Amino acid sequence: MPANRFNNFTNYGIGIGLRVPHYGHILSRKPTVDWFEIISENFMVDGGRPLKVLDSILDQYRVVQHGVAIYFGSSDGLNRTHLAKLKRLVKRTNTPWVSDHLCWGSVDGSYSHDLLPLPYTFEAARHVAQRIREARDYLEVPILVENVSSYAEFHASEMTEWEFLSEVVERADAGILLDVNNIYVSSQNHNFNPYDYLDHIPHGRVGQIHIAGHSKFEKYILDTHDHPVLDPVWKMYAHAIGLIGPTATLLEWDDRIPSFDEVHAEALKAGRFCTDLVRQPAAV
């Protein structure tokens, strides 16, 4: 299956999030890792240990930037100071793309520091798409938007979440960071079929995939990123790879972080799905 327009990096393979508890292991042991994903905001500083570590990582590994604070859905104008720092980091890392979330999180300059869901309306899609285009034109790299996990819905919504995501990326001419775990979490919280989501997004716009663990409570499921990927999410990931083809995939593990080797081993499980796809005989 050939690379799609937004995924010209099929050789990126499987990545891991760069996290503080693993700095020593990575820098001393130099493990074989396809690439590291960094949270952009952790490195948008003028100096100090974060940039020193980052430069050491860049000497040996490919790095992809993932953000948590552009808030494409907020009604405020884009934060130009934030974008200027982000662009400086883009040039430092030579990241092939920048990703952030399809959400809102600020009002009148006050920030929630949370990824809040949007109403799935055409007005919201137009607003978000315009801000994505503005950010892309300023940063001068492709932008991928990530679907978030959600725990509440808006009565004003005019379409499903996957229809909204599709509407936004088509209007913005953007890519998708497809978080399979987030789809599963939201599907259980809001009672929809997660495979309908996977089947009906524009597959040619998926440039990266996230997988992660979640926690199940009595009345809802929470996107916790604090343990291995669960079986329903692996099954959805296999389905997604079958639809999209080999795609740069990142394992997220952000709380109760175990040893580097344990995280790495969990991430590498994703590789077998891509390998199995490549090995499948072509249809005749």
Image (cartoon, rainbow, N blue to C red):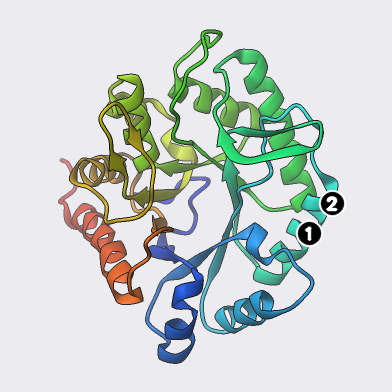
Query: Relative to residue 198, is residue 19 drawn left or right?
Result: right
Q: Quadrant of the C terminus?
A: top left
Up-down: is 99 above or below 35?
above
Identify the image quadrant of residue 196.
Answer: top left
Residue kind at label 1, given as amino acid type: Lys
Residue kind at label 2, given as amino acid type: Thr
How crowded pointer 1 is (Cα within 10 Å; few <14, some 14-19, many 20+) is rated as some
The residue singled out by tag 1 in the image is: 85
Query: Which residue of the protein is positioned furthest toward the front in this rendering?
Result: 218
Write the residue at 28% across / 45% down.
237
User: Is residue 133 or residue 251 the one in the foreground?
Assistant: 251
User: Is residue 112 or residue 281 the one in the foreground?
Assistant: 112
Secondary structure state at the residue bearing disc 1: helix
User: Is residue 284 or residue 25 the one in the foreground?
Assistant: 25
The residue singled out by tag 2 in the image is: 81
Q: Are marks 1 and 2 in contact (CB under 8 Å)?
A: yes
Write the residue at 59% across / 27% down.
168
The mark found on residue 164 in the picture is none
Up-down: is 192 above or below 236?
above
How crowded pointer 2 is (Cα within 10 Å; few <14, some 14-19, many 20+) is rated as few
Q: Position of residue 232 (x, y in %)?
A: 21, 40
Write the residue at 28% across / 28% down.
195
Please give the count of numbered marks on the rendered protein: 2
Q: Position of residue 29 (x, y in %)?
A: 40, 89
Write the residue at 61% across / 48% down.
68
Q: Position of residue 217 (x, y in %)?
A: 28, 35
Query: Relative to residue 168, is residue 236 drawn left or right?
Result: left
User: Is residue 89 or residue 254 the one in the foreground?
Assistant: 254
Identify the image quadrant of residue 127.
Answer: top right
Separation of residues labelled 1 and 2 (CA atoms): 6 Å
Up-down: is 165 above or below 174?
above
Secondary structure state at the residue bearing disc 2: helix
